[in-house]
Amino acid sequence: MSRKVAELLDSRARHLLRALISEYIRDGHPVGSRTLARTAGLDVSPATIRNVMADLEEIGLVAAPHSSAGRVPTAQGYRVFVDTLLEIKPLDASEAALIHSGIPAAAGTQALLSNASSLLSCHDLSDGGLAVAAAESAFAGGFGMSIDLSRVAWNGSENGWTDVALLFSESASRLLVTVRRENHETFEAIMGETCWSRVGIVIEEQILSIEAIEGHDVIMADLAELKEAWQKTLWEL
């Protein structure tokens, strides 16, 4: 059935559906036409993308949580993605070695599950930088965070090493990861010589606290207020 549905889609619709689902899997938020216009790699306007999204919604592959939000994939949309659109690329040697280094040679199912569960969350820094990634990870997980900007890895010039740059520099290749306290040594060993740094801790208090390079609080915000501000931008789109 999913292959028959996929045959109804032209190349542009297939490309946008793949891009929408990939974006949604990565961030977990409804995907708007402006986001797709920026990230999908097609030379089309947001208006054209909205028309395609309307067609995809009509055949049941995407849905809008509410009128002012972007779209999310439906169960049928996921099925089309898995059966016909998903592109699986083989790991390169360094990626395979990184995975194998964290898995014991004789690991059973339980050991593999325990290894995977050491990672609690992972959010890229592509949309709003560290500040936005930390806020979204915190209110999505229901726990606060305390972060020290002086501990953030920085490879730029000394003049560029500022609170603003560390907070808001965007990069899809940088990730904010949380792990269980008891597993942090294992995770750090797996990371090995990869560029990484431990920048803070997860806390029970419902706040996001970010300390500036010089030691003063640059952000001290309640998670509920952050979430309300984040949702308000969706309502206004």
Image (cartoon, grey):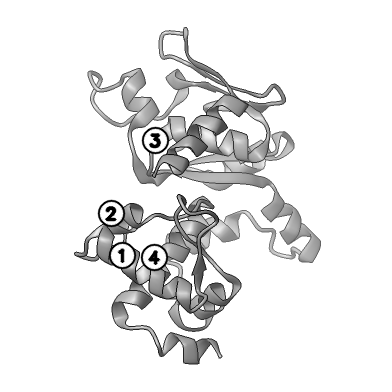
Residue at the disc numbered 4: 19
The CA span between labels 4 and 2 is 11 Å
* Disc 4 residue crowd, few under 14, some 14–19, many 20+, Cα 10 Å: some
Q: Earlier in the sequence, mark 2 or mark 3?
A: 2
Q: Earlier in the sequence, mark 1 or mark 4?
A: 4
Residue at the disc numbered 1: 49
In the picture, measured across the screen, residue 205 lies left or right of residue 59, that is right
* Disc 1 residue crowd, few under 14, some 14–19, many 20+, Cα 10 Å: many
Q: Secondary structure at mark 1?
A: helix
**Does residue 131 sit above or below 18 in this rendering?**
above
Residue appearing at x 45%, y 50% in the figure: 68
Name the spot of residue 77 as percent of width and height, x first: 52, 74
224 and 21: which one is in front?
224
Cβ atoms at labels 2 and 3 below 8 Å apart: no
* Disc 2 residue crowd, few under 14, some 14–19, many 20+, Cα 10 Å: few
What's the amino acid at mark 3?
Gly
Residue at the disc numbered 2: 38
Q: Can you tell which mark lies on residue 129? A: 3
Q: Secondary structure at mark 4?
A: helix
Query: Can the viewer see residue 22?
Result: yes
Q: Earlier in the sequence, mark 4 or mark 3?
A: 4
Residue appearing at x 62%, y 54% in the figure: 102
Q: Quadrant of the C terminus?
A: top left
